[in-house]
Amino acid sequence: MKYPLNIHIVWHQDSPISKKIATELYNTFSRDYKKPLSRGLGIPVYFRYKKLSDGSILPIDFTNAEKNVIILLIDEEYFDDDVYVGYTKQLLEEVDNNNRVFPITLYEKAYTISSELSKIQFTNARVFLNQKLDLELEEDLTKAIEKIKFEILHDCSRLIMDFQKTADDTETDRINSPVKLFLSHAKKDGEILAIKFKQFIENNLKLDVFFDTVDIANGYDFAEQFSQNISESALLVFHTDEYSNREWCRREVLLAKKHKSPIVVVHSIKNGESRAFPYLGNMPTTVLTEENDYNFYKIVYLTLIQVLNNLYQHRLLSQYKEFIHKQVYTLTSPPELINLIHLEMNEEETIVLYPDPPLGIEETSILNRFNKNLKFVTPITINKI
């Protein structure tokens, strides 16, 4: 069995800034080490920073995963050390469609470290929202880390989806992005917000956005187009006062859950709701305090986490599924009652396989009332079958 994706982070052992960045990347892509029971992406993350007794750096095993991401945190210490420069050149020999190098600029000369590396697009951590940053300052370092995480989340999604970069894939060209957002909103009080967010995406990011009737081709069935686009996208819900009152909004959520699409809810309630829609639970949420670029970045960041989680868990659980000699139903998020109505039930025991950590007994006991033949399992509890 191979992991769908491994992440390797290379930095200089004498760089405290790189160590902070590497730790934050570990917390994002694997699991927050301070909160071991929290839900995380669970992607294996390996560090390469310390020289061995012979002065070399431990090689990377590329055979342990289907795909590998190598993140290079290139600062001045890294740039000036021949051991790290040589190690970088060795890594570049392994680059192909399954093993990608993502260099991060922490030093203004980082682009010149290698002629081969200069052909790869760098993530400039010294710039965020068109501002030059001083990475020695805690606030600026935090902003730089957010930018790095954002870029790596998108690039990892592209890699898992086998999406190949093209020559015309520039900062302003969104056509070549495999990640699509479906903006779900109520026209009465959410359209202006959705338009602002769509414009932000178009002006700043490499993401495709499906936005209401504007993106439905003339002559095509409205409902069919909606269903198709939701099944291929991450659903971003702008949860305003009128959202739950709108039939199409409710249908969009139900369609996304039926297709197991990633969903993120942005709370923007002003006065309250006459009735909350019950199926807006069991998904990540965020609160929109101000409609500005920084908060819009945070929304996309949370959505990209769900996109990558969906892609990664789908491939990981598919491998575990092969070891279970029973009927198996896989979910990339914790199970809920609405998931179970799409099951083809019979008298045999059915395994519902979902990501770690396991649900508490207070939830699984309710789910089992739907059908006593369901057994809820995660990778760490699979041996109990």
Image (spheres, rainbow, N blue to C red):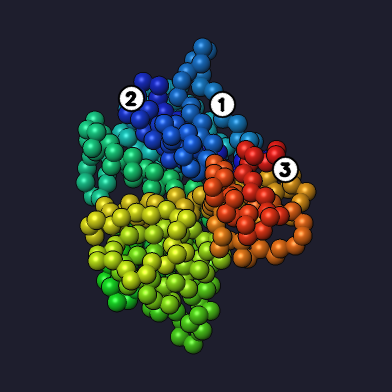
Image point 39% across, 51% down: which residue?
Answer: 302
Give the residue number, with chain letter if any, for mark 2: 16
Q: Nearer the viewer, residue 274 or 180?
A: 274
Q: Which mark is residue 59?
A: 1
Give the mark toward the camera: 3 or 2: 3
Of the 4 image quadrants, the one containing the C terminus is top right
Q: Position of residue 96 (x, y in %)?
A: 57, 44
Give the residue number, with chain letter if any, for mark 3: 385
Image point 43% across, 45% down: which residue?
Answer: 152
SS label for mark 1: loop
Image point 22% across, 57% down: which residue?
Answer: 290
Q: Is residue 185 above or below residue 115?
A: below
Residue at the top extreme, as displayed: 53
Q: Position of residue 283 (x, y in %)?
A: 45, 55
- Indicate the amino acid at tag 2: Pro
Q: Position of residue 304 (x, y in %)?
A: 43, 53
Q: Which class describes the residues within 10 Å of circle 1: few (<14), some (14-19), or many (20+)?
A: few
Q: Nearer the viewer, residue 193 or 245?
A: 245
SS label for mark 2: helix
- Indicate the amino acid at tag 3: Ile
